[in-house]
Amino acid sequence: MNIAFFLTPKSEVIYEKHTATMRQALERMEYHSYTAIPLIDSKGHYVGTLTEGDLLWKVKNSEDFSFRNVEKILVKDIPLSTKIEPVKINSDIEGLIDLAKSQNFVPVVDDNQIFIGIITRSDIINYCFNMIYNSSELNTLVVNQN
């Protein structure tokens, strides 16, 4: 199966440019109620995932931190605590599922590492549930006919 079947395209994904300010990232995450968002560079390459924890650690570890200076802190200067691995669009389903076991979403990149979207763990679970449900429903029909 082609993993593109599961893809939520970049145009429908909330992400942030790594040149954004901490305030912009905080506001975007708050507005959409997300705890993590993909980061891309100015050329569209996936560079990592920013989490609420990354923002909190930046606050904790910054001397003289105030909310007035969140407009001066760039996202690219915030250390990312969790490495969210991307998958290439031509990867197999096994590799996707392996990553999705430990990530709420899997960023998808093309052969040039350009960010093209995400695949959510819930989409994969829903697909698997439907496969199991439809398979067991089919088996029930076959058993009942015999």
Image: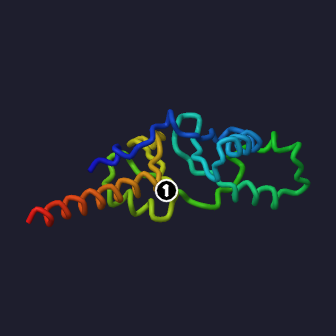
Query: Where's residue 95, x and y in %?
Result: 36, 59
Identify which residue, 105 or 57, lies in the foreground: 105
| Amino acid type, callout 1 | Glu
Q: Which residue is mark 1?
A: 85
The answer to whether 67 appears left or right of 139 in the picture is: right
Query: Where's residue 117, x and y in %?
Result: 47, 41
Query: Where's residue 128, x and y in %?
Result: 34, 58
Q: Residue at x 82, y 61 (%)?
A: 60
Identify which residue, 75 or 121, lies in the foreground: 121
* Colouring rule applied to residues: rainbow
Identify which residue, 78 or 124, lies in the foreground: 124
Q: Residue at x 64, y 61 (%)?
A: 81
Q: Quadrant of the C terminus?
A: bottom left
Q: Residue at x 75, y 44 (%)?
A: 22
Query: Where's residue 77, x and y in %?
Result: 71, 49
The answer to whether 62 appears left or right of 102 in the picture is: right
At mark 1, the secondary structure is loop
Disc 1 packing (10 Å; few <14; some 14–19; many ≥20):
some
Q: Residue at x 14, y 66 (%)?
A: 143
